[in-house]
Amino acid sequence: MIYHDTLEFAHQLDEQDALKAFRDDFLIPKHNGEPAIYLCGNSLGLQPKSAKNYIQEQLNAWEDNAVEGWFIGNEPWLKYHRLLLGPLSNILGAKETEITVMNSLTVNLHLLMVSFYKPTGNRFKILMEAGAFPSDQYAMESQVRFHGFDPKEAIIEVAPRPGETTLPTEDILKQIADNANELALVMFSGINYYTGQFFDLEAISKAGHEAGAIVGFDLAHAAGNVPLKLHDWQADFACWCSYKYMNSGPGGISGIFVHEKHFNDTSLNRFAGWWGYRKDKQFLMAPGFEAEIGAEGWNVSTSPIILMALHRASLNIFEKAGGLQSLRAKSEMLTGYLEYIIGRVNDKYGEDVYQIITPTEKNQRGCQLSVVCKRDARTIFNYLAQNGVIGDWREPDVIRLSPVPLYNSYIDVYKAAQTLFKALGAVK
Ligand SMILES: *Cc1c(COP(=O)(O)O)cnc(C)c1O
């Protein structure tokens, strides 16, 4: 694709965009009465206009049926979570039985660690990427301590080479192989939140298994962003949040994946609750936990129906849009355009003031570009915000910009770049 740095060109790409109508399905925040340039779907996705209706339906069901709502009505709450599994299985590349919807992300990470971090003898270490999202670091450290180990000894972090910011796949695979006898778990994010690097999850899964370890993924920045094939890649478990690229609202409900190869493994620990009990016998209220077969057996507590209704609003838009495959084609173009046009800003300024640290290869990134500002980064970020370009800031000098194919346009990207250029007039 040959890009051009003009408003006409951006406009033309929008005209040709088969997905352009989906922007109208979302509520875009305003800046001075005009739609803002919202490039922050990596942090909180926008609200689907339909969200209110999905919630209202459940408020109506509560009004009409009260407690009977668990069993009657168009969508009895007892099985409401299953309405989400079709779209989620497409987004995650999993069988419906391998997924369930529950809790929030860090809580789920802990629950999955109960089942899948099983240190024994020399095999007690966890290998993860250096600079993982802080909540994941805290979860790993506290899990390791819970089992009586010292995080300094038990956690191996794969770090970039000196002077680099991203991780070559070969370095990850080599460290897995080098520590093969000691690894209990390989735990990686799908996309690193800071750099935007999309890891080769299939290769990591394969290497982890060859090393005799369990392999888990945190897909917070990957789910709803890039196509995934958790089942085929043989991941043992995964978790994600839904409020980033899946637009389920602040603190929206999260989900987990457990590969079907573990369904019959009765040796797995779990912290059980009645919502994971065999559905056919749940209301016999008998003593002794018997898990539902599949990921659902990891459910703990009563379904939060309102959160699930919110999640469903956006998942149904994913389905209407033709799923991740069709969104991904636009996403590559949109992010490619942002990358190109930031390069043009540098050219016009006569200096590489904006340095993109996210990989250039399409299969190593999703929507997000992480941009290091070489001058007065905070002033630039503030200028963007004051001029209606919403990205987000990461210390010490990184601005993350994520054009999302469901609701961002090429004109958004064009205008964001214009603002990045004008911002340079404000720096010292
Ligand atoms: C966003 C994010 C989280 C947030 O976890 P919550 O439990 O939803 O607060 C955790 N881990 C990663 C990798 C994230 O990107």
Image (spheres, helix red, strand yellow):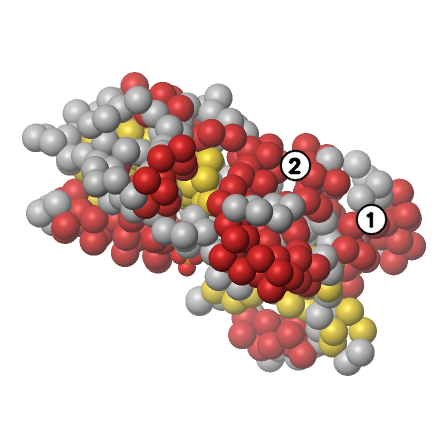
Locate residue 315 relative to residue 299 in the image: left or right.
right
Q: Nearer the viewer, residue 292 or 166?
A: 292
Tag shown at residue 79: none
Mark 1 or 2, nearer chain start: 1
User: Cα distance, mark 1 to mark 2?
Assistant: 15 Å
Residue 226: % across, % down: 59, 38
Q: Nearer the viewer, residue 127 or 428?
A: 127
Within 10 Å of disc 2 (Cα), the crowding (few <14, some 14-19, many 20+) is many
Total numbered circles: 2
> Which quarter of the figure has residue 261?
top left
Can residue 204 be seen in this snapshot? no
> Which quarter of the figure has residue 354?
bottom right
Q: Nearer the viewer, residue 216 or 411?
A: 216
Amino acid on which disc 2 is placed: Leu
Locate residue 181 relative to residue 352 in the image: left or right.
left
Can residue 98 be seen in this snapshot? yes
Identify which residue is drawn at 59% across, 72% down: 381
Q: Is residue 191 above or below residue 230?
A: below
Identify which residue is drawn at 30% across, 19% down: 210
Identify the image quadrant of the N terminus: top right
Q: Which residue position is annotated with label 2?
A: 324
Tag shown at residue 20: 1
Residue 409: % across, % down: 78, 54
Locate residue 254 relative to residue 336 in the image: left or right.
left
> Which quarter of the figure has residue 212?
top left
Q: Quarter for ligand 1? A: bottom left
Q: What is the secondary structure assignment of the residue under circle 2? A: helix
